[in-house]
Image (cartoon, grey):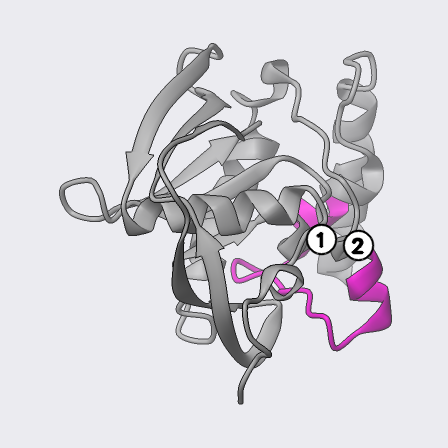
């Protein structure tokens, strides 16, 4: 074990002990995943059997008490660095894709001025409107493939605001709604290939 990894492991143990009284707090393994990886985190893929098992798990919420703490801020920063990295160049990423079975996603908000990437903890889709429409999709966890999926273009999302620690609801439309549906599927162990209208193509 190198010195940096050893320090990260010790820090993860200390942090886990500090918040162990909070129900649903980070485990020491999760803290190591957050703090022990480089800024651009490893993205799990279906090409690995062990990765696939984690990608198929249902995710749990992050206690609101942890959202103002440094570990969550580090996770949010690294998720953004990962999805925007030249290696990935994605429009969204979910907790399981970086090794954490937690309900958190990072999404490019094409519906907002400047098209910023934002992170949404404890997110759920609470309303779907209209009819589904077909559209092409790919996934960082399914490299080299694309396929057609039916998605709604008008939804409501609910998440915990890291600033207020209160539940916040937003109406999302257009292509951004498609991204949110794709990423929220990951939180329920669903990959876009489960919903294909056609077989994936190279």
Distance Cα–Cα, label 1 vs label 2: 7 Å
The structure residue drawn at horizontal position 79% and vertical position 54%, both measured from the top left corner, is: 54
Badge 2 crowding class, 10 Å Cα cut-off, few under 14, some 14 to 19, many 20 or more, is many
Which residue is disc 2 drawn over?
54
Indicate left or right for 44 with 110 as reference.
right
Residue 33, position as x, y percentages in the image: 72, 50
Residue 35, position as x, y percentages in the image: 66, 47
Q: Which mark is residue 99?
A: 1
Q: Please tell me which residue lies in front, 136 or 49.
A: 136
Q: Is residue 103 magenta?
A: no
N-terminal-most mark, 1 or 2: 2
Look at the image and tell me whether residue 2 can be seen.
no
Q: Which residues, given as a range, are shown in magenta?
A: 32-53
Indicate left or right for 111 with 32 as reference.
left
Residue 65, position as x, y percentages in the image: 61, 14
The structure residue drawn at horizontal position 44% and vertical position 44%, both measured from the top left corner, is: 180
Indicate left or right for 198 with 14 as reference.
left
Badge 1 crowding class, 10 Å Cα cut-off, few under 14, some 14 to 19, many 20 or more, is some
Instruction: Decide: is 201 above or below 96.
Output: below
The structure residue drawn at horizontal position 53% and vertical position 89%, both measured from the top left corner, is: 202
Q: Which mark is residue 29?
A: none
Instruction: Decide: is 70 above or below 2.
Output: above
Look at the image and tell me whether residue 14 can be seen.
yes
Q: Please tell me which residue lies in front, 79 or 124.
A: 124
Residue at the extreme front: 131
Q: Please tell me which residue lies in front, 159 or 125.
A: 125
Image quadrant occupied by the N terminus: bottom right
Indicate left or right for 115 with 164 as reference.
left
Instruction: Decide: is 41 above or below 200.
Output: above
């Amino acid at each position: 074990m190198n010195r940096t990894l050893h320090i990260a492991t010790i820090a993860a143990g200390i942090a886990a002990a500090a918040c162990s009284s909070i129900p649903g707090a980070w485990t020491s393994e999760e803290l190591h995943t957050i703090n022990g990886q480089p800024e651009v985190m490893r993205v799990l893929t279906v090409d690995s059997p062990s990765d696939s098992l984690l990608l198929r798990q249902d995710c749990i919420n992050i206690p609101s008490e942890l959202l103002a703490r440094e570990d969550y801020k580090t996770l949010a920063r690294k998720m953004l660095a990962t999805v925007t990295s030249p290696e990935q160049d994605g429009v969204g990423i979910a907790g399981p894709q970086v090794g954490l079975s937690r309900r958190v996603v990072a999404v490019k908000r094409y519906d907002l001025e400047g098209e910023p990437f934002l992170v949404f903890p404890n997110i759920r889709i609470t309303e779907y409107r209209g009819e589904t429409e077909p559209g092409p999709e790919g996934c960082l966890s399914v490299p080299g493939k694309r396929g057609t999926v039916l998605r709604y273009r008008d939804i409501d999302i609910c998440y915990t605001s890291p600033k207020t620690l209160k539940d916040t609801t937003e109406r999302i439309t257009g292509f951004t709604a498609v991204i949110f549906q794709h990423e929220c599927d990951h939180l329920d162990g669903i990959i876009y290939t489960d919903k294909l209208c056609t077989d994936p193509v190279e």
